[in-house]
Image (cartoon, grey):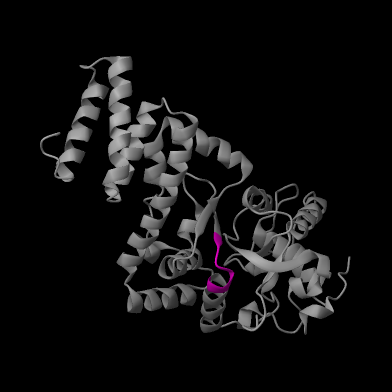
Amino acid sequence: QRHPDNGAMGSCQSSKIHEDKPVVGLRLSVFRQLLAEAALVQPHEGPLRYWEDTPTRRAAGEQLTTADVCGEIVKPHTLERKCSYVHALPAEGIAPATFYASHAWKYFFADVVSALEQAVGDDDGIWFCMLINNQHETVSMTYEFLEGEFRRNVESVGRVVLVFAPWSAPITLTRAWCLFEIFVCVQRGIPLEVIMPAAQLIDFATALVDDFDSVALALSKIALDEAEATKPEDKANILRAVEASVGVGELDKQVLRELRSWLARAGSSALAAEPDNWGLANALGRLLKTQGRHDEAEPLYRLALKGREEQLGANHPETLTSVNNLAQMLKTQGKLGEA
């Protein structure tokens, strides 16, 4: 199937975004169409994954990753003209980018689309590197070009959605470019929203309520110097750039702070839905305390203490834990008389 030319997009020989034009994005309909095409090729064995160190093939029936969609659908569609996918689309699939998608190419493409559908409307535009950048030119794209493109587009779009899957060990937190994109958000004060596939959301919501601490632990495993990149030289350059700016250790801390802020918002929403969950209130209070948000943590500690006293009794170990947590919080705030 050939895609008609979109003349309004200019020459299809370049995927660069001009600063005097809105950043180009793709509507959800484009992702759904690609998902439908992926379903058609899924029953058949895939071609060699030439980008792997030791190339393998996708087994017949195996879901397509984002990388597979690029190799099996996007590049064949654009091979004759050697252009980016966006430049081969009709105008109705294109919209000014209102979301910048940070994702991992290892993800199943169906999971990425499911995650996007949780946050993005049908009329929104999504900046998605695989479909915006010319995949016939990626081999020749230098780190300097990609770093400039990613930074400029994150800043221009002004809103980033970070795909998390699985929530307990997100692949995106192990990818150097994804951590770089989060870093740009932190540097520029750009909103960052974590999104998940629908199936993951169910498990995550359960964990938020039943085992909040395990979620906080999962988000604490961030280390840029251990992250991966398809091109080792890209990782080396990212490390050098970050070291010259704030330092790798500080970046890890900044990314962790941003993710903990998001987790606090998610925890608050979960607690609003289950206000009698004293364990969640206590855990959320601890998280806010570690962020220095003592005024927000105190009422949560009081809520947990009140609930546990009424439900478990004044001498129950969990109640005494809440007493100690509140006392330590009041001491930190200088409220020694109350403590």
Which residue: 71% across, 78% down? 136
Residue sitting nearer the eye, 49 or 132: 132
Q: Residue at x 30, y 48 (%)?
A: 293
Tell whether 327 sits left or right of 29: left
* Quadrant of the drawing holding the N terminus: bottom right
Q: Residue furthest left?
A: 337
Look at the image and give the residue range highlighted in magenta: 155-160
Residue 274 in the image: state x and y as whole percent.
47, 28
Q: Does residue 163 lie above or below 100 as drawn?
A: above
Most foreground residue, 299 or 171: 299
Q: Where's the C terminus, which quadrant?
A: top left
On the rendered structure, is 321 left or right of 206? left
Kindly tell me whether residue 127 is visible in this rendering. no
Residue 118 makes an appearance in the image: yes
Q: Position of residue 239 (x, y in %)?
A: 39, 73
274 to the left or right of 37: left
Residue at image location 43% in from the left, 78% down from the top = 237
Where is residue 258 shown, x and y percent of the image? Answer: 40, 57
